[in-house]
């Protein structure tokens, strides 16, 4: 089992001596299966040894998150990233060349030969190399880290070590204070496990910049034909309703036959023209129920 930190330590990495000590302590903590908080180019992250299942579980516990939301993995080099995945696919290398290090997380098929447990990943891994000197220096010493935003689940992502410490407390062994993080936007996440890249989360890198590299980028809107068909159905029902209320008007001319004398027994249908005008059902029929709003 990963050990819970009894006393957290925070290091001011703006001071050269503190920075050196902090990095050394963070590396030691990771090797002891403990958690560390470090700055990145997006927000502060809480990290654990990606190859120690108990440490990854401790990370999820600290955030109050389940195994159904596995953390991404941060790396200190492209070479480290390629060792974690089956292959980079058609677009992986181009996206890495354009945006790494940077705020782009790429989802690949995980290397099946690796012995690790990040949660319910369905055989995939989300990888990123951050553009932050301190983070990369730590990652080159520790190797790949499972890293998630340094906040309790449901709370805003921390942009400083102090904010992270208020939420995570002594569940983290070492806090590396690198000042305010670069910006509040999380990384953009693109799934490369299919034949066409798919945007999983909009973030710091705009969609149009991703498209400039891959050409086609699927989004949530591209999966909307089914809801569109469902919303069209009620409209069709509403359009069909007036055809019922118009029925009496269409039969209205028939009463002109009433003043005419009936020398012979009327046909059975002659007694019916007035009935549609007396029927309240079409006008009083309840409106179709409104489509429930999504949460």
Image (tube, helix red, strand yellow):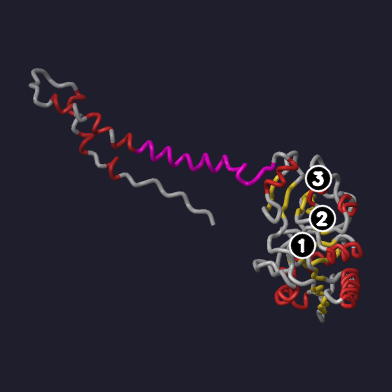
The x and y percentages for residue 233 are: 46, 39
Query: Which of 126/115 is in front?
Result: 126
Residue behind mark 2: 101
The label number, if any, that marks residue 216 in the structure image: none
Locate residue 269: give its quadrant. top left
Residue closest to the far top: 264
Instruction: For marks 3 and 2, give the one nearer the viewer.
Output: 2
For the residues marked 3 and 1, what is the alpha-carbon distance in whole angstroms?
Answer: 21 Å
Quadrant location, the C terminus: bottom right
The magenta stretch is 217-241
Q: Residues within 10 Å of mark 1 (few under 14, many from 20)?
A: many
Q: Which residue is mark 3?
A: 92
Which numbered disc covers residue 41? 1
Q: Give the spatial CA distance, label 3 vs label 2.
A: 13 Å
Closer to the chain start, of discs 3 and 2, is: 3
Circle 3 crowding by C-alpha within 10 Å: few under 14, some 14–19, many from 20:
many
Say if 71 sits above or below 176 in the image. above
Is residue 20 a member of the stretch shown in magenta?
no
Q: In this orientation, which residue lies closer to the viewer: 49 or 254?
A: 49
Report how many numbered discs are placed on residues in the image.
Answer: 3
Do the residues under discs 1 and 2 have CB atoms within 8 angstroms?
Answer: yes
């Amino acid at each position: 089992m990963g050990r819970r930190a009894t006393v957290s330590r925070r290091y001011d990495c703006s001071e050269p001596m503190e920075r050196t000590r902090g990095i050394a302590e963070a590396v030691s903590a990771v090797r002891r299966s403990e958690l560390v908080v470090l700055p990145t180019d997006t927000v502060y992250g809480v990290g654990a040894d990606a190859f120690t299942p108990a440490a990854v579980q401790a990370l999820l516990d600290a955030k109050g998150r389940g195994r159904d939301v596995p953390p991404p993995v941060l790396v200190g080099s492209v070479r480290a990233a390629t060792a974690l995945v089956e292959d980079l696919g058609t677009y992986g290398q181009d996206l890495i060349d354009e945006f790494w290090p940077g705020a782009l997380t790429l989802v690949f098929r995980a290397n099946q030969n690796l012995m690790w447990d990040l949660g319910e990943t369905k055989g995939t891994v989300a990888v990123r190399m951050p553009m932050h000197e301190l983070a990369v220096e730590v990652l080159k010493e520790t190797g790949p880290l499972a890293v998630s935003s340094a906040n309790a689940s449901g709370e805003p992502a921390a942009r400083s070590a102090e904010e992270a410490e208020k939420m995570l407390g002594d569940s983290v062994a070492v806090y590396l204070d690198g000042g305010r993080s670069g910006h509040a936007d999380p990384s953009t996440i693109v799934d490369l496990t299919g034949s066409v890249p798919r945007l999983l989360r909009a973030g710091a890198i705009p969609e149009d910049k991703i498209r400039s590299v891959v050409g086609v980028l699927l989004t949530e809107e591209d999966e909307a034909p089914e809801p569109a068909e469902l919303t069209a159905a009620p409209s069709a029902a509403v359009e069909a309703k007036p055809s019922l209320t118009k029925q009496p008007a269409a039969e209205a001319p028939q009463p002109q036959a009433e003043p005419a004398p009936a020398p012979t027994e009327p046909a059975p249908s002659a007694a019916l023209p007035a009935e549609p005008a007396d029927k309240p059902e079409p006008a009083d029929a309840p409106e179709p129920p409104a489509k429930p709003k999504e949460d």
